[in-house]
Amino acid sequence: DADVTQTPRNRITKTGKRIMLECSQTKGHDRMYWYRQDPGLGLRLIYYSFDVKDINKGEISDGYSVSRQAQAKFSLSLESAIPNQTALYFCATSDWGGGSYNEQFFGPGTRLTVL
Amino acid sequence: QQQVKQSPQSLIVQKGGISIINCAYENTAFDYFPWYQQFPGKGPALLIAIRPDVSEKKEGRFTISFNKSAKQFSLHIMDSQPGDSATYFCAASRTGGYNKLIFGAGTRLAVHP
């Protein structure tokens, strides 16, 4: 079974609709991240969380919100979707490194299209 | 503001050739430089990483070269194979704190038989 799962894998929605992307992990990691990937722009951090009480904005958080329901679950919401939020979205997790960097493990991604 | 600049955007290499992807960073506080590999339909996965206390790290056919004074690092893929065809992302991070990764724009590599 995959360690980091994302649902749905594909979603087409209309402008103005609310949509939620979900991420679950079985790795037991405390840290979770949401990224979006756009051609020519790489991956950009939307939000990140170190535990259920810790939520932080990334470089492109406008238009998005998140919820950390449990250590293993981190959801990304688009309150009112717009076409320029069409992108590939990735969830990632990492362990606490005790001050040193730890590898991030990515889910398979959600392809979101906003019409 | 792009803190990690990656080039080229795309690269075509013949089987057996050397693939070279370059990255440059701006923030001198970065002290961890990973490369991630992404196959179509999959999430990125860590390929190899380096810290600035060494100038080179090799794992099999993959080598990172690091130039601290120039604030540049590169990925070399020796004896490139069609199975290496993927998108490669360089990244940079500061250890400690939140370990946020700053990614480059990515390089799409195609290795032709």
Image (cartoon, rainbow, N blue to C red):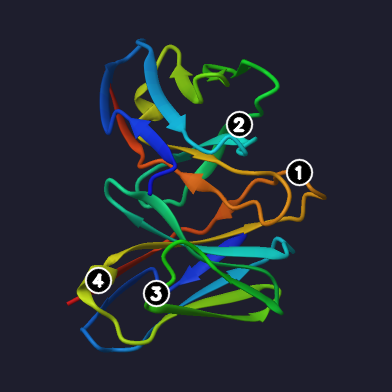
In this view, the mark in front (2 or 1): 1
On the image, the x and y values in percent for residue B49 come to 61, 31
> Could you tell me which chain the residue with mark 1 belongs to?
A
Q: Is residue B88 visible?
A: no
* Amino acid at circle 4: Thr
Q: Which residue is mark 1?
A: A100
The local crowd at label 2, few if under 14, some if 14 to 19, many if 20 or more residues have their Cα within 10 Å, is many
Q: Tag 1: Cα neighbours inside 10 Å, few (<14), some, or many (≥20)?
A: few
Residue that protrudes farthest toward the left in the picture: A115
* Real-space Cα separation, disc 1 to disc 4, in angstroms: 37 Å
Residue A74 vertical placement versus B68 (above, below): below
Please report the residue visible at 71 percent of the width from the left and 74 percent of the height from the top.
A71
- Residue B85 x %, y %: 35, 31
Q: CA distance from mark 4 to mark 3?
A: 18 Å
- How far is mark 4 from mark 2, CA to CA? 33 Å
Q: Which type of secondary structure does the marked residue at label 4 adopt?
A: strand
Distance from the alpha carbon under mark 2 to that under mark 1:
13 Å
Label whose residue precedes the other's in the sequence (4 or 3): 3
Mark seen at residue A62: 3
Q: Are marks 4 and 2 on the same chain?
A: no
Q: Amino acid at mark 3?
A: Asp
Q: Amino acid at mark 1?
A: Ser
Comparing marks 1 and 4, which lies closer to the viewer?
1
Residue at the image position 70 percent from the left and 22 percent from the top:
B53
Marks 4 and 2 in Cβ contact (< 8 Å): no
